[in-house]
Image (tube, rainbow, N blue to C red):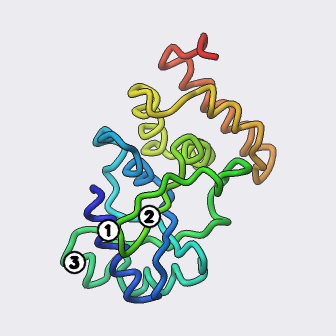
Amino acid sequence: MNLSHIHHVLTEAKKITNHTDYVIIGSLTALGLKVDPPDEMVRSIDVDMYPKDDPGRAGEIAALIGQGSPFEDEHGYYVDAASPDLPTLPDGWEDRFVIHDFGDVKALFLELNDAAISKYARGEIRDRIWIQEGLKMKLLSMPTIECRLRQTAFLDELEETSVKQRIAEDKKLLNLDNET
């Protein structure tokens, strides 16, 4: 995926909802960077998103240009409905969007270190690869992630413990134990 794909999806979403600002979460937040992210961070074919001012309409968008739609058949990518309540994120995440203004629509990308917290909480293999690539390429900062971890309300103690364990594993794997 690349920014032109994001612009295409947002333009189609605007036709459905008439909204212009869309929040992008998930793996494709890496497209908000000013540099080209590694392939491992943008391999996804689904754009996890919602209209910033009307999150409840994300399902309507996904129904028309989501998985299994003629849009996906034609273009090879699709929208996955997201919600601001779905991911585990640190306090203040909505103040740290990375904004890409396409003129007719805006993409508000979740800041990468915030996205990493959410990915650590989910803990899937592809999420761990995304994080590890970001850390290797210095697109993510372990000190920032650990600081934001203290600002995160987790679902429960198990989720928090699991996130801390995954962070410890990555620090050891990537030899980041001395980073401060």
In the rendered view, tell whether residue 16 sits above or below residue 79: below
Residue 73: which numbered mark, if any? 3
Query: Residue at 69% across / 38% down in the picture?
Result: 148
Q: Earlier in the sequence, mark 1 or mark 3?
A: 1
**Quarter that holds the C terminus:** top right
Query: Residue at 74% across / 41% down in the picture?
Result: 160
Q: Secondary structure at mark 2?
A: strand
Q: With 91 as the anchor, is 134 left or right in this view? A: left
Query: Residue at 63% across / 25% down in the picture?
Result: 143
Label 2 sits on residue: 107
Q: CA distance from mark 1 to mark 3?
A: 18 Å
Q: Are marks 2 and 1 in contact (CB under 8 Å)?
A: yes
Q: Nearer the viewer, residue 115 or 11?
A: 11
Q: Residue furthest left?
A: 74
**Quarter that holds the N terminus:** bottom left
Q: Secondary structure at mark 1?
A: helix
Q: How many marks?
A: 3
Q: Position of residue 55 (x, y in %)?
A: 59, 77
Q: Nearer the viewer, residue 86 or 96?
A: 96
Q: Mark 2 belongs to which amino acid?
A: Ala
Q: Position of residue 62 (x, y in %)?
A: 43, 80
Q: Earlier in the sequence, mark 2 or mark 1?
A: 1
Q: Mark 1 belongs to which amino acid?
A: His
Label 1 sits on residue: 7
Q: With 86 as the anchor, is 175 left or right in this view? A: left
Q: Classify 10 Å Cα crowding around label 3: few (below 14), some (14-19), many (20 and above).
A: few
